[in-house]
Image (spheres, rainbow, N blue to C red):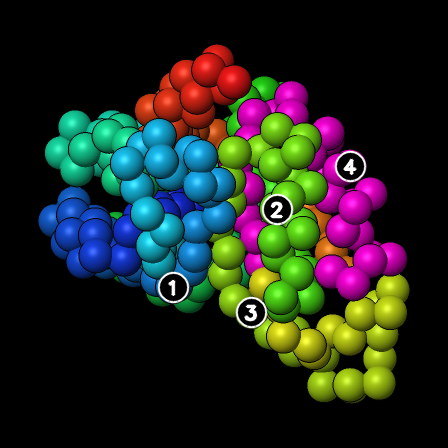
């Protein structure tokens, strides 16, 4: 693992320009964005006083110390810890494809590739980001299985495979089909249970043809208020 972090922020679409401006004010120029959709259940949305809305996923790459500062400032300056405002997380970056890639991904941050240092391999991570890739139109079955195993919600990104050979199959799944990528942030201790539930009920042998993996998450902002609201709702059942 390297001293670089992929910083991911998921917010309502109407907030994306505010967060883009926030990053640029703090010297982060290379910002990438995607349109996506939240999957929080209606019960949780009602608890938070929210309706189902489109989301924007912003991601950028910064050094670890800067990522830590930005996470704190998004809470203090952007109100990221307020229910419904969004969530941010950092993922350790394993490697960079040379100086040119580093320059493009960290424009104007004055990072020299020789200064990107290793950090301890034995670090424990409290959270993990589960990535599930399923056939388009089946993400609800994937999320239902995940939610039954304890997941609160996720973020859906529409995608498409790039295999040029349409006849090629992977576990019966055409790699070039329309896909949906579901991102689920969860406590590290819950990861295995959630992934097992998805693979049992919506795995490669189901119509969803889901394949999945997980990434370690070093830090999270904006999750506490959502978890507290969900816990209060569960207590009333």
Q: Residue 164: x and y, percent? A: 72, 86
- Which residue, given by chain and number where applicable, does mark 1 sit on? 35
Q: Residue furthest top?
A: 235
> Whole-Å distance between the Cαs marked 3 and 2?
17 Å
Label 3 vs label 2, nearer the camera: 2
- Which residue, given by chain and number where applicable, does mark 3 sit on? 159
Q: Observer-nearest residue: 62 or 142? A: 142
Q: Residues within 10 Å of mark 4 (few under 14, many from 20)?
A: some
Q: Is residue 18 visible?
A: yes
> Whole-Å distance between the Cαs marked 4 and 2?
13 Å
Q: On the image, which quarter does residue 171 sit in?
A: bottom right
Region rendered in magenta? 181-208
> Whole-Å distance between the Cαs marked 4 and 3?
23 Å
Compare marks 3 and 2 and give the one earlier in the sequence: 2
- Which residue, given by chain and number where applicable, does mark 4 sit on? 196
Up-down relation of residue 180 to residue 229 (above or below): below
């Amino acid at each position: 693992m390297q001293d670089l972090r992929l910083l991911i922020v998921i917010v309502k679409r109407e907030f994306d320009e505010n967060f883009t401006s926030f990053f640029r004010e703090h010297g982060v120029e290379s910002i990438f964005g995607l349109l996506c959709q939240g999957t929080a259940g209606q019960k949780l949305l009602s608890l938070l006083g929210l309706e189902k809305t489109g989301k924007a996923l912003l991601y950028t790459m910064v050094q670890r110390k800067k990522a830590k500062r930005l996470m704190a400032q998004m809470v203090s300056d952007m109100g990221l810890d307020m229910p419904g405002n969004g969530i941010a997380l950092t993922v350790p970056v394993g490697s960079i494809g040379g100086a040119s890639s580093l320059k493009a991904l960290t424009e104007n941050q004055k990072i020299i590739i020789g200064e990107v240092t290793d950090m301890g391999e034995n670090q424990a991570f409290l959270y993990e980001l589960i990535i599930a890739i399923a056939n388009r139109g089946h993400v609800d079955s994937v999320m239902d299985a995940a939610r039954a195993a304890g997941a609160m919600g996720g973020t859906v990104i529409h995608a498409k495979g790039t295999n040029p050979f349409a006849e090629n199959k992977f576990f019966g799944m055409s790699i070039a089909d329309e896909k949906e990528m579901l991102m689920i942030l969860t406590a590290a201790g819950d990861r295995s249970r959630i992934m097992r539930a998805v693979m049992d009920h919506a795995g490669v042998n189901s119509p969803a043809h889901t394949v999945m993996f997980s990434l370690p998450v070093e830090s999270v902002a904006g999750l506490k208020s959502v978890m507290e609201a969900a816990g209060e709702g569960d207590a009333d059942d």
